[in-house]
Amino acid sequence: MNREQARNLLHAAREGETLASRALDSFLARLLAVWGAVYTLGYGLFPESGKAWAALVVAGFTLSFFFGAQEGQYLRSGVGRKLALVWSAFGVDLFALMLAGERLGTGQPLAINLLVALAWMASGVVLERGGILLAGALYALANGLVFALLPTPYFPLLAGAGLLAFLFGIFWGIRGLR
Amino acid sequence: MAFDELIHQPTRLKLMAYLTRLGPDARVEFKKLQRDLGLTEGNLSRHLTKLEEAGYLRVEKGFVGRRPRTWVGLTGKGWDAFLAHVQELERLVKGEGA
């Protein structure tokens, strides 16, 4: 076998890896779109309404676990099980933070978003994707900075970030279908 | 020298790469594999049978609800064979082999 043939075969192997990555990406894209929509609606329209937030979070978790169960019909892996554990643990933390809402006062949204960032970072570690780990870390840093330095536009900025996540999730999902 | 004649075939190489990328314990349903790799049912079945006979894959029948499903996953032997084969290809591309 010559070098050119070996190169073509390596190309076929990379193509197989890309196809597998796309299979995972389409699931992540759906999650991003769902939670982007939750953030856009929650922080954009009902930032202070506990009831509206509770309904949105329940809807977000229901859809996320529905997508997870749907994915599990075709693809099962240790990675998927670990991701389900990471986000289930996040759900428990979120519930605890919502219960403690009044005592936490204005710090509650920051605490929740730091947990979101932590769950993304853990997902990055599970998926062995440095980009997701970095994005989670940057999200935590941006939240802390904006909350401390620009408290007034904190909610509108989170709504904007949600809209970006929603659009990116839709774009990512559509691109993955091609 | 770790060239593996069985994995060498481009479709089987792509199939093994797909499964390797999903992790050592991943299992993929036959129809999904067929759709993602763009293969016909017969073609995919033939490749799976060859790889299963070599001990590189495990093929399991099961149910999701009432629907029958066929699950495909790599074995440890298949995982090692694929990585060794790719390593050999990379060595050749770098000009270290014949």
Image: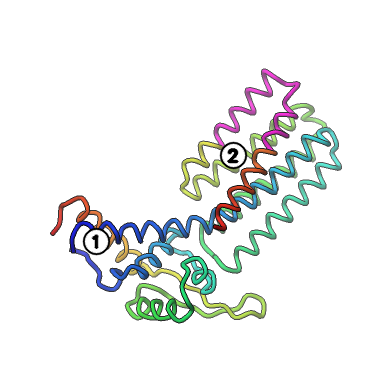
Location of mark 1 (residue): A5
On what subunit does the disc labeled 2 rest? A
- Which residue lies at the image location 51% right of the left edge and 74% below the top edge? B30
Residue neighbourhood size for the residue with mark 1, other residues' Cα within 10 Å, grouped as few (<14), some (14–19), many (≥20): few
Residue occupying the far top of the picture: A149
Instruction: Give me the residue at 78% from left, 50% from top.
Output: A58
Q: Which residue is mark 2?
A: A118
Q: Residue at x 77, y 51 (%)?
A: A59
Q: Tell me the magenta residue range.
A: A136-162
Q: How is the image coloured?
A: rainbow
Q: Is residue A140 magenta?
A: yes
Q: Which callout, 2 or 1, points to the residue nearer the camera?
A: 1
Assess disc 2: are there few (<14), some (14-19) or many (≥20) residues with their C-alpha within 10 Å of its C-alpha: some
Upstream in the sequence, badge 2 or badge 1?
Answer: 1
Judging depth in this view, the residue of A22 and A43 nearest the camera is A22
Q: Main secondary structure of the magenta part?
A: helix
Does B47 sit left or right of A80 as displayed?
Answer: left
Quadrant location, the N terminus of chain B = bottom left
